[in-house]
Amino acid sequence: MTSIQTNKVVTITLNPALDLTGSVDALSIGSVSLVSKGSLHAAGKGVNVAKVLSDLGAEVTVTGFLGRDNEELFCQLFEEMNANDQFVRVDGATRINVKLVEQDGRVSDINFPGVDVSEQAIAEFESRLFELAKTHEFFVLAGSLPQGVSPELCATWIEKLHQLGKKVMFDSSRAALAAGLDAHPWLIKPNDEELSEFVGRELNTPEACQQAAQDLADKGIENVVVSLGSKGVMWLGKNEEADASWIYSQPPKMNVVSTVGAGDTLVAGLCWGHVNQWERAQILSFATALSALAVSQVGVGVPNVEDVKELQQQVTLHNPISSNV
């Protein structure tokens, strides 16, 4: 299938959030922790992906559900990104999530449930989504689900996009991930913890992660990308000969400032490589470098693409990583 227009991407954030981020020396559970600096900004996994894609040069359309009561920071961000805002407005306020970043780079998340989405809002979202499907090939559905949207309903959207021949990159967890895996997403990106949770067993070796990823690929998922944090990224997908094969990337060692948004940045890098129709090795090395750069800075985005290209030269690729796959 040829691209409709290669730089166009739709990001879907069903449960966005305003991220209240605070920096602390060390988090003191059960007592007072003093925040040295803080920020409040529009976020959510799909919104983060959209921000990075926009910085890279993509023409981004953003959609999902957004509370009317506190939409200002989102509207401001979408305007800065020159994004096509197709979010459905709903009654109430978009949730605020708290992220506490310690000096050693550890992040503690306190995530709230989000708005309650009505059947009318769902119908409006579906109308917008499948209208966008007429002119877009790539869709990124990322993050958790709001109240009113069941995992099963979310899975029907993925399945319908799949039936329309669209490439859906799906990044979620828990029940939403479990339901979505049976809906034929084109690419999924669990981290090793999420993968372990889904298969119900510990994954202590690369081979164990490979087998778990293979189990997911057997569901008809073309690309299974497993993030291993600082250890790198494993990707089971089709090579240039259309055969399923593994490729593994090892990022350069970075001075970790914050891991907030690193996974979303990885997804954006994978998406950008695919819309540009790069070869797998180039896609993975770029996405890995992009994610590595993300942990060395505060905030989500790409201040300088040249920095990514420089880091990309330091990414190590191995293919395959195990002879029994």
Image (cartoon, rainbow, N blue to C red):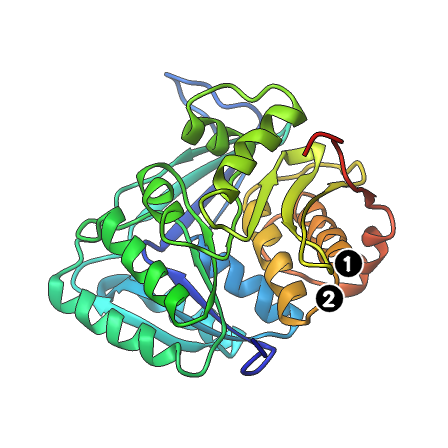
Q: Can residue 43 be seen in this view?
A: no
Within 10 angstroms of label 1, few (less than 14), some, or many (20 or more) residues?
A: some
Q: In this view, does 22 lie above or below 27?
A: below
Where residue 186 appears, as percent x and y from the top left, is: 50, 57
Q: Which of 123 and 50 is in front in this view?
A: 123
Q: Name the residue under label 1.
A: 282
Q: In this view, does 149 lie above or below 228?
A: below
Q: Which of 288 and 54 is in front in this view?
A: 288
Q: Name the residue under label 2.
A: 278
Q: Can residue 58 be seen in this view?
A: yes
What amino acid is found at the position of numbered circle 2 in the picture? Trp
Q: Which SS class for mark 1?
A: helix
Instruction: Kindly identify the residue that appears in the image at 73 percent across and 41 percent down.
Output: 248
Quadrant including the C terminus: top right
- How far apart are the alpha carbons under marks 2 and 1? 6 Å
Quadrant including the N terminus: bottom right
Where residue 10 appears, as percent x and y from the top left, is: 46, 70
Q: Which of 30 and 92 is in front in this view?
A: 92
What amino acid is found at the position of numbered circle 1 in the picture? Gln
Instruction: Kindly identify the residue that appears in the image at 12 percent across and 68 percent down.
Output: 120
Where residue 160 appears, as percent x and y from the top left, is: 33, 65
Instruction: Kindly identify the residue that appears in the image at 49 percent across and 23 percent down.
Output: 27
